[in-house]
Image (cartoon, helix red, strand yellow):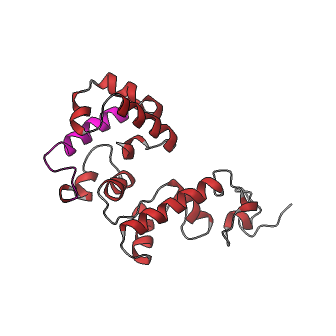
Amino acid sequence: MGAVLTQNTAWTNAAAALARLREAGVRVPADVMVLSHRRLAGLVRSSGYFNQKAKKLKAIAVLFSRPGALTPAGAPSREALLSHWGIGPETADSILLYAFHLPVFVVDAYTRRILSRIGLIGSGAAYEHIQAMFHDSLERNTALYNEYHALIVHHAKQHCRVRPECTTCPVKPCRHRDRGGDPARPAGAPRS
């Protein structure tokens, strides 16, 4: 549920929705399926886009309600996840990595921001291209991918924010810092 609820919102908002779901006794797909859309939307309101997310949770509950679906052996394929409405690459990969402990690297906005600022990707880099960089460079290991992603998220929250804290950032080189922290000034352009 967290992989859906965190779409287009901060994790704190998704966590608040998850807490409300737990308080209401909603823990497994069958619990989601018996709730009315209105009740479910109300419980996940803090995650934003609550009507859409309630629909997505209902759809994904059907996928995970079959016997054995919540075990590693019952893990759906990435393609099966992507075939469901409301599940894109990041959500599918989050489910596979965090719920089923499969070695799939999750590419999120933090990953894109950091890699773009240090010059490893362009602004339009495809999800699969970015993911392949990690899959090709790191051992295919669930714990490693989980830790690496957690470190990226931590760095982005501490330093590489939308409005970055370049003065305390340990990462060099960085195109953003190299142009004086001004995203409007091209790299290498003289400072005023």
The quadrant of the image that shows the C terminus is bottom right
Q: Which quarter of the figure has residue 63?
A: top left
x, y percent for residue 55 = 30, 33
x, y percent for residue 103 = 34, 66
Q: Which quarter of the figure has residue 107?
A: bottom left
Residue placed at 35% from the left, 59% from the top?
Answer: 97
Residue placed at 47% from the left, 31% from the top?
Answer: 46
Q: Which quarter of the figure has residue 137?
A: bottom left
The quadrant of the image that shows the N terminus is top left
Residue placed at 24% from the left, 38% from the top?
Answer: 29
Label total for image? 0
Residue placed at 45% from the left, 40% from the top?
Answer: 15
Q: Is residue 60 left or right of residue 159?
A: left
> Can you say whether 44 is above or below 107 in the image?
above
Residue 21 among those drawn in magenta? no
Residue found at the far right of this picture? 192
x, y percent for residue 178 = 73, 68
Segment tinted magenta in the rendering:
52-72
